[in-house]
Amino acid sequence: MAIVDRQQRSSERKMFGLCPFWQTSTTTNDSSSSSSTRNLNHNGSRHSETMPVKRSKTVSSIARSLLPPRRRLRLDPSNNLYFPYEPGTQARSAIRLKNTSKSHVAFKFQTTAPKSCFMRPPGGILAPGESIIATVFKFIERPENNEVQVDLKSKVKFKIMSLKVTAGVDYLPELFDEQRDQVTVERILRVVFLDVGRPSPALDKLKRQLAEAEAALETRKKPAPDIGPRVGGEGLVIDEWKERREKYLARQQVEAVDST
């Protein structure tokens, strides 16, 4: 029996020797499995560490894009431009602009009706905390069939834009084109007509602001100390409006000729 057992074990060793891949494959599979497990755990931990950061960055960027732009100017009135309804005349409105930021701010007006509207001043630069009352002029056409359009919003709109600038920079309209990405649309204002024969808080406020604007204009018109060449004063409003309109019409005619 001992001889038979030794022969059997010897034959088993020979067969095992003829098939060495059993042992290597088992060992390899075990090592690869453990290595894969380690890699999976390592990658998983790294993934879990990086994913919250990426997610937080994505959420913050989306949140910033959804936030309204930060206003630099405070407008009064804030949503509308009120004009006394006087058909056939050049009516006036007024709006106060105040720089509420900590830097110098350039502002600029735009309108959908440049033929019949203009602003004084059309743009400028305000220091921190500085304010100005701008006057807006609009020619009110006579309605057809003498229809009264009191307290109705006009289709004309005004846009006020702002731009952060450094102190000492001279105002140029081209600043808003050169730094278009930094421009903020402060407000889009609608035109509202007021009945001059019907007293209202809006009409009283408009009269006060126009009086302040006129007083400020008269102050600016006062001759400055004689320290250099004299600069000509401002012309009449109606002349300024006519000149701007003539230039606009001439430019339109030139563009029409060029297009043909």
Image (cartoon, rainbow, N blue to C red):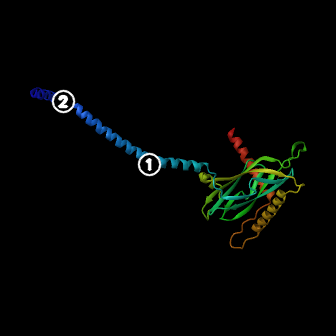
Quickly name the residue at label 2: 16
Query: Callout 2, which amino acid?
Result: Phe
Q: Are marks 2 and 1 in contact (CB under 8 Å)?
A: no
Does residue 170 appear in the picture of this structure? no
* Point 26% across, 36% down: residue: 27
Quadrant of the rendering where the C terminus is positioned: top right
Q: Quadrant of residue 43?
A: top left
Camera-side residue of 229 and 32: 32
Crowd band around label 2 with a 10 angstrom C-alpha radius: few (<14), some (14–19), many (20+): few
* Point 87% across, 53% down: residue: 195
List x then y, in percent, for residue 232: 74, 65
Q: Is residue 228 left or right of residue 43?
A: right
Could you say which disc has been placed on residue 141 in the image? none
Q: State which tag comes first along the sequence, 2 or 1.
A: 2
List x then y, in percent, for residue 82: 80, 54
Query: Callout 1, which amino acid?
Result: Glu
| Above/below status of 127 relative to 36 | below
Q: Is residue 59 left or right of residue 22?
A: right
Could you say which disc has been placed on residue 49 in the image? 1
For numbered disc 2, what is the local secondary structure?
helix
List x then y, in percent, for residue 117: 77, 51
- In the picture as drawn, the residue positioned furthest to the left comes out as 3
